[in-house]
């Protein structure tokens, strides 16, 4: 037995899941680490630059304050005061450059070589000299406020330049600068730390994701193996121990197991159905063959004997064709086009049907009141179902005195209920569900010579299901069988006219034959 292309199941094997999971986790880790790195790297730079700017402002402020306190009536005195203060602050790559330009007095600074245009030193190329001169003029012509310059030997330099008015109404240009090497240093430290931490985090994340992938894909691999066995025709394997209750994989495994249970049941049911159908067909065929052999064995059979065999063969052929019709009908019931629904005037429909059914046998036929209204149903299929129920009651009641009763009631939710009852032996409690299975007959029915094939109630249920209704067996007040067929789609009529069938209630009817109920 093949349940589907083996290729599809092969594709179920989750070989790449672990690596795909690890790959995605690695990608997400890389992106997160990258974004965090950019934020921290730039944040560190910005914070340190702000700190440097604050320090420069403090240094320039102190220099200006100092000059304003100095007793410097002349430019020369002012220049001397500036020199004194500035020379107390030596410059190195980690401390502050200070300068003050007093008009007419030159530049007082703790790093004079940055400002002086020199003659070339020994070993210094003219290109170096040109660069240094250019740097000196950039420093001298730096705009007021904060600026960043790139100077030879010093590197990036943050500079704050201010014009300050001091004693004697003189204007002095003062400046403070600080190399940005510390910022670059701190940022490269951040980068190194991030590279190290990033590599560790990435390795850890890939490893963890791989382990999770292995754990998650284990039950999937087990399911793929089970599916492969099912594909090979073995419906028995099930998936066990796939994780905690409520786990998605457990839910999937349960659904898978449930599907296999249903498939197993369906196949078993189908096998039993085919076996039962073959058996039911074989019995009348055996009878016909036996009778024909008996006839053939006689060299000159009498015409009475020929008629007897003919009569018997016809009866068996009728039985076979009824069985085949029933089987075809049950097969059709699975299709969507099974019903041809229309609006039925319930009271008129039931009255007419009952008149026909009550002619089938001699029993005490009783029809209760029928609610007036319209029912949306297939009239032929519904008639077939009701005929099967009444036929069963006829089969199980005593001729002439037996009671066969039908009641029709309105049920909640726009439904209508057809109840067929009798005073026969009834259906035992434990058989009340099984009688609706195909070919099922109770032991008592099996013993009877006139027993049917056991498809009648299965057909009733198929018709009920197709209408979206239900059917169930119970016990009548007289101790006989009671079958309730409930269908949706009933719209009651609001005129309180008594239904036509109501008058027909409890009228005993007689008839000659019990045949042809279906
Ligand atoms: N009114 C009833 N009283 C007692 N037993 C019943 C009644 N109706 C059905 N049954 C039991 O339910 C079984 C199934 O009924 P169903 O109509 O499906 O089959 P059947 O009547 O045996 O055969 P078929 O209807 O195919 O000719 C019957 O064999 C019988 O045992
Ligand atoms: Mg029947």
Image: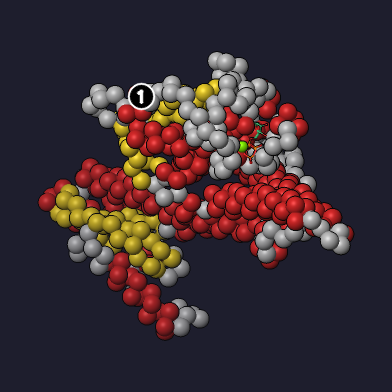
Q: Residue at x 75, y 30 (%)?
A: 443
Q: What residue appears at the point 12 percent right and 51 percent down from the top-left corner?
A: 169
User: Where does the image place residue 25, in percent across and percent down from the top left?
Assistant: 59, 54
- The local secondary structure at tag 1 comes to helix
The image shows residue 14 at horizontal and vertical percentages of: 68, 57
Relative to 474, say whether 125 is above or below: below
Locate the C terminus and report the quarter of the image it occupies. Answer: top right
Question: Which quarter of the picture shows residue 157?
Answer: bottom left
Q: Nearer the viewer, residue 87 or 195?
A: 195
In the image, taking residue 224 as reference, residue 81 lies left or right, namely: left
Going by the image, does 503 lie left or right of 335? left
The answer to whether 50 appears left or right of 257 in the picture is left
Q: Which residue is mark 1?
A: 502
Callout 1: CB less than 8 Å from ligand 1: no
| Residue 462: percent from left, percent from top | 55, 42
Quadrant in which residue 109 is drawn: bottom left
Image quarter for ligand 2: top right
- Measuring 42% from the left and 45% from the top, which residue is drawn there? 378
Look at the picture and state if 166 lies above or below 122: above
Residue 22: x %, y % from top left: 63, 56
Quarter of the figure with the N terminus: bottom right
């Amino acid at each position: 037995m093949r349940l589907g292309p083996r290729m599809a199941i092969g594709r179920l094997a989750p070989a790449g899941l672990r690596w795909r999971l690890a790959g995605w986790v690695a990608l997400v880790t890389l992106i997160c680490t990258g974004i965090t790195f950019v934020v921290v790297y730039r944040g560190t730079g910005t914070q340190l630059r702000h700190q440097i700017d604050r320090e420069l402002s403090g240094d320039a402020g102190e220099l200006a304050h100092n000059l304003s306190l100095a007793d410097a009536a002349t430019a020369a005195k002012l220049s001397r005061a500036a020199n004194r203060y500035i020379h107390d602050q030596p410059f190195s790559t980690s401390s502050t450059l200070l300068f003050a330009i007093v008009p007419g007095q030159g530049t007082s600074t703790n790093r004079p070589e940055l400002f002086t245009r020199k003659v070339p030193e020994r070993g210094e190329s003219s290109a170096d000299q040109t660069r240094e001169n250019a740097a000196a003029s950039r420093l001298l012509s730096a705009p007021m406020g904060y600026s960043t310059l790139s100077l030879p030997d010093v590197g990036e330099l943050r500079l704050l330049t201010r014009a300050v008015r001091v004693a004697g109404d003189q204007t002095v240009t003062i400046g403070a600068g600080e190399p940005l090497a510390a910022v670059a240093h701190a940022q490269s430290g951040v980068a190194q730390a991030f590279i190290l931490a990033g590599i560790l985090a990435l390795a850890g994340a890939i490893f963890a994701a791989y382990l999770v992938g292995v754990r998650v894909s284990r039950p999937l691999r087990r399911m793929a193996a089970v599916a492969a066995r099912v594909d090979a025709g073995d419906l028995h394997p099930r998936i066990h121990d796939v994780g905690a209750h409520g786990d998605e994989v457990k839910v999937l495994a349960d659904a898978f197991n449930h599907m296999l249970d249903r498939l197993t049941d369906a196949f078993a049911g189908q096998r039993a159905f085919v076996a039962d159908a073959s058996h039911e067909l074989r019995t009348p065929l055996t009878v016909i063959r036996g009778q024909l052999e008996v006839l053939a064995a006689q060299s000159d059979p009498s015409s009475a004997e020929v008629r007897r065999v003919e009569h018997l063969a016809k009866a068996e052929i009728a039985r076979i064709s009824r069985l085949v019709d029933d089987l075809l009908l049950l097969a059709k019931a699975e299709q969507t086009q099974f019903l041809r629904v229309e609006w039925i005037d319930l009271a008129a429909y039931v009255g007419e049907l009952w008149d026909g059914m009550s002619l089938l046998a001699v029993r005490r036929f009783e029809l209760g009141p029928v609610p007036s209204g319209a029912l949306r149903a297939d009239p032929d299929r519904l008639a077939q179902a009701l005929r099967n129920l009444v036929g069963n009651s006829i089969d199980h009641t005593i001729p002439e005195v037996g009671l066969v009763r039908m009641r029709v009631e309105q049920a909640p939710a726009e439904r209508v209920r057809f109840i067929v009852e009798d005073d026969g032996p009834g259906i035992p409690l434990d058989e009340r569900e099984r009688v609706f299975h195909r070919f099922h007959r109770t032991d008592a029915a099996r013993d009877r010579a006139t027993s049917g094939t056991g498809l009648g109630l299965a057909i009733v249920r198929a018709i009920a299901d197709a209408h979206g209704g239900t059917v169930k067996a119970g016990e009548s007040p007289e101790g006989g069988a009671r079958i309730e067929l409930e269908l949706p789609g009933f719209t009651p009529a609001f005129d309180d006219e008594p239904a036509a069938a109501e008058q027909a209630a409890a009228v005993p009817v007689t008839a000659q034959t019990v045949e042809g109920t279906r």
